[in-house]
Image (cartoon, rainbow, N blue to C red):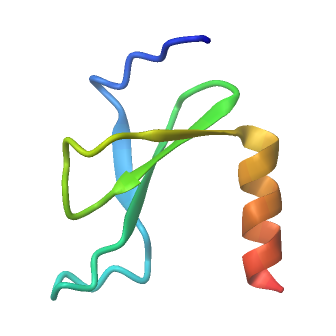
Amino acid sequence: MREYDLTNARWQKSSYSNGEGGDCVEVADGVPGAVPVRDSKVEDSPVLLLGASAWASFLDDIRH
């Protein structure tokens, strides 16, 4: 399994996170071939790494 250094990852909250207990997920960019996803309420939560194509399929599915 490949390891990724996410120390300097640029995390972005979901646009549906409202800062009033509605926080949900964050994703990080700049990781070639993978999309790190974590719980935005817990900054040191475990990170789920999705392949870029799996993430694109997920986004496409939720848009439709």
Q: Quadrant of residue 1?
A: top right
Relative to 21, say whether 23 is above or below. Answer: above
Residue 32 drawn at (x, y percent): 64, 24
Residue 61 drawn at (x, y percent): 81, 74
Relative to 32, say whether 11 is above or below. Answer: below
Point out the image quarter for the C terminus. bottom right
Q: Looking at the image, which residue is at 50% across and 12% down?
A: 3
Q: Is residue 54 left or right of residue 35?
A: right
Number of callouts: 0
Residue 52 drawn at (x, y percent): 73, 40
Q: Looking at the image, which residue is at 52% across and 31% down?
A: 30
Q: Looking at the image, which residue is at 39% across and 16% down?
A: 5
Residue 18 drawn at (x, y percent): 27, 86
Going by the picture, which residue comes out furthest to the top? 2
Q: Looking at the image, which residue is at 78% across and 48% down?
A: 54
